[in-house]
Amino acid sequence: MTGGMTGGAADGATGGTTGGAAGGARGGAGLRVPALVLAAGGGSRLGGRPKALLPYRGRPLLEHALAVAADGGCDGAVAVLGAAAAEVRARAATGECRLVDNPDWRTGLASSLLAGLAALPPETTAVLVLLVDTPGVTAEAVRRLRTAHAARTDLAACAYAGRRAHPVLIGAAHFPFLRTTATGDAGARALLASRPVALVDCTGTGTPDDLDTPADLARWGIG
């Protein structure tokens, strides 16, 4: 799930690494940065267990991702559901998060990304994209991306020991390009490959590893 959004390791085409210390989480007058949580995955390699409902630290992964976004200073959240959407709505406490059903979730990550973009508030200046199956991403990483946007960065990704990964911040100016290029499981890959991406150093804040196999679940203590 991760590769389709970030395109893997950083290289010379990306922007330089931004400093690590975070400022005020909601700094920047007039900026609105909601989280977009992509939570449609069906967990085909996990025995068909919807990723949004995998238990982590006593609650579903979707609840954990929304808490990370809120604690990191995001201005609300949109979550895109797919597999077992009705069950996710019934079992996950999502508060004021806007839930969007993506009936085309099986076609790949891009369909969820586009469904989420369409549901963002009109005053959005950038969106912070989180994958529901990255429990090691922390609120501090979210805060650092928010701080980068407050400094007028409009396309940024976290970097861990120099490797570009999640989360990703995408400014509203890039939404039209994203709508025309996001396909299949590629997600935002074309956007991130064609434009300078500021790397925000999040080394030591957590890990962006995603959950794709039973071994991944065991490593994170998910039964």
Image (cartoon, rainbow, N blue to C red):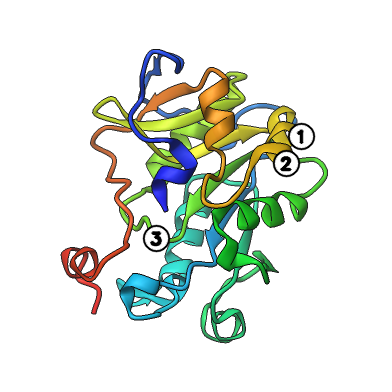
* Residue matched to label 1: 176
At numbered mark 2, what does the secondary structure look like: helix, strand or loop?
helix
Q: CA distance from mark 3 to mark 2?
A: 23 Å
Looking at the rendering, in which quadrant would you find the C terminus?
bottom left
Q: Which image quarter: residue 83?
A: bottom right
Query: How would you rate the neighbour count of disc 1 (Cα within 10 Å): few for under 14, some for 14-19, many for 20 or more?
Result: few
At numbered mark 1, what does the secondary structure look like: helix, strand or loop?
helix
Task: Tell whether 87 sits left or right of 121.
Answer: left
Asked if residue 68 is positioned above or below residue 59 in the image, the reply reads above
Q: Horizontal and vertical percent for residue 80? A: 62, 63
Q: Which image quarter: residue 214?
A: bottom left
Q: CA distance from mark 1 to mark 2?
A: 5 Å
* Residue matched to label 3: 133
Q: Earlier in the sequence, mark 3 or mark 2?
A: 3
Q: Horizontal and vertical percent for residue 8? A: 36, 35
Amino acid identity at mark 2: Arg
At numbered mark 3, what does the secondary structure look like: helix, strand or loop?
loop
The residue at 60%/30% (across/down) is: 27
Given the current orientation, which residue lies at the most extreme right position? 122
Query: How would you rate the neighbour count of disc 3 (Cα within 10 Å): few for under 14, some for 14-19, many for 20 or more?
Result: many
Q: Earlier in the sequence, mark 1 or mark 3?
A: 3
Amino acid identity at mark 3: Asp
Q: CA distance from mark 1 to mark 3?
A: 27 Å
Asked if residue 82 is positioned above or below residue 48 in the image, the reply reads above
Residue nearest the viewer, comparing 172 with 27: 172
Amino acid identity at mark 1: Pro
Q: Which image quarter: residue 152?
A: top right
The residue at 65%/64% (across/down) is: 97
The numbered dot on residue 179 is 2
Is the residue under label 2 in contact with that under label 1 (CB below 8 Å)? yes
Task: Tell whether 36 sits left or right of 118.
Answer: left
